[in-house]
Image: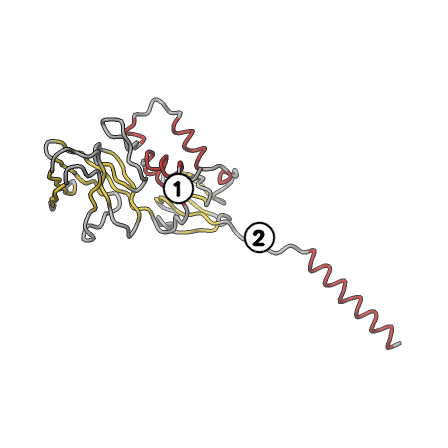
Amino acid sequence: MQHCRCLLLAAAVLVGSVLAALVPEPARADSLVVAEARGGGLKPGQTIDAAQPIKLGSGERVTLIASNGAIIKLTGPFEGVPDISGRRLASVAESLVRLGSQSTQSSTTLGTVRAPNGTLPPEPWLIDVGSSGHRCVQQDASVVFWRPPATTDQTMQLSPSDRAWQGQAKWPAGADQLRMPSSFQAQDGQAYIVAIDSGASTVTLHVIPLAMDNDMMRAAWMLDQGCMGQAQLLISRLK
């Protein structure tokens, strides 16, 4: 009798082990980063669970970015999980193609960082000041201005759009880059006037949240902020 009980116990343990192996582990929840938020109790840079329900009232809106760079835009009234149509399966590359096909939009609207002579900055994090538009910068990183090199030394003057302050620096002949001092901290959404000798441009800087932790997400965020040229450069390095 004792021997039978041991056999039954061993069988029960074995069956339990097999059943436990067949039960899948809870799936790891996908996350989304809030790029823009007007309501819904969300803040830009916040990370949320993709399965977390969101409620938006009339006129409220939110932009979310998935880890593969997919952009999800929601407008209130809305209540439910944010990715209702599997939109985070789309990639940022598809967004680039879609935006690039909108030929009716001007290069200024798209935020293309193209200099007057047709050249482009060699790196996505160089801030083109040869024309006006939106530019994206990394948080806690030095801001480096770019323009095609001149044959003579020139003076650059920098000020916010309200001209609350003004600074200046020499841009040496033959140099295409000018690094801003550490004391210059770009303010998100702030427009700056950059005057170099007789020419001037207005660039609006957007600071990328640290939660955008891969280049696909950063490129998607750039697209949403209007920095299309920089996004194109960043994506081209991933191919």
The answer to whether 174 appears left or right of 139 in the picture is: left
Q: In the rendered picture of this protein, how many numbered marks are placed on residues?
A: 2
Image quadrant where residue 195 sits: top left
The answer to whether 127 appears left or right of 160 in the picture is: right
Whichever of labels 2 and 1 marks the residue nearer the N terminus, that label is 2
Q: Is residue 10 above or below residue 170?
A: below
Q: Amino acid at mark 1?
A: Thr
Q: Is residue 116 above or below residue 170?
A: above
Residue 164 spot, x, y in % from top left:
12, 45
Q: Amino acid at mark 2?
A: Ala
Cα separation between marks 2 and 1: 24 Å
Q: Residue at x 27, y 41 (%)?
A: 126
Q: Residue at x 20, y 53 (%)?
A: 182
Secondary structure found at label 1: strand
Q: Which of the image's four quarters has the C terminus? A: top left
| Residue labelled with disc 2 | 27
Image quadrant where residue 154 sits: top left
Q: How is the image coloured?
A: secondary structure
Secondary structure found at label 2: loop
| Residue labelled with disc 1 | 63
Which is closer to the viewer, label 2 or label 1?
A: 2
Q: Residues within 10 Å of mark 1 (few under 14, many from 20)?
A: many
Q: Residue at x 24, y 44 (%)?
A: 144
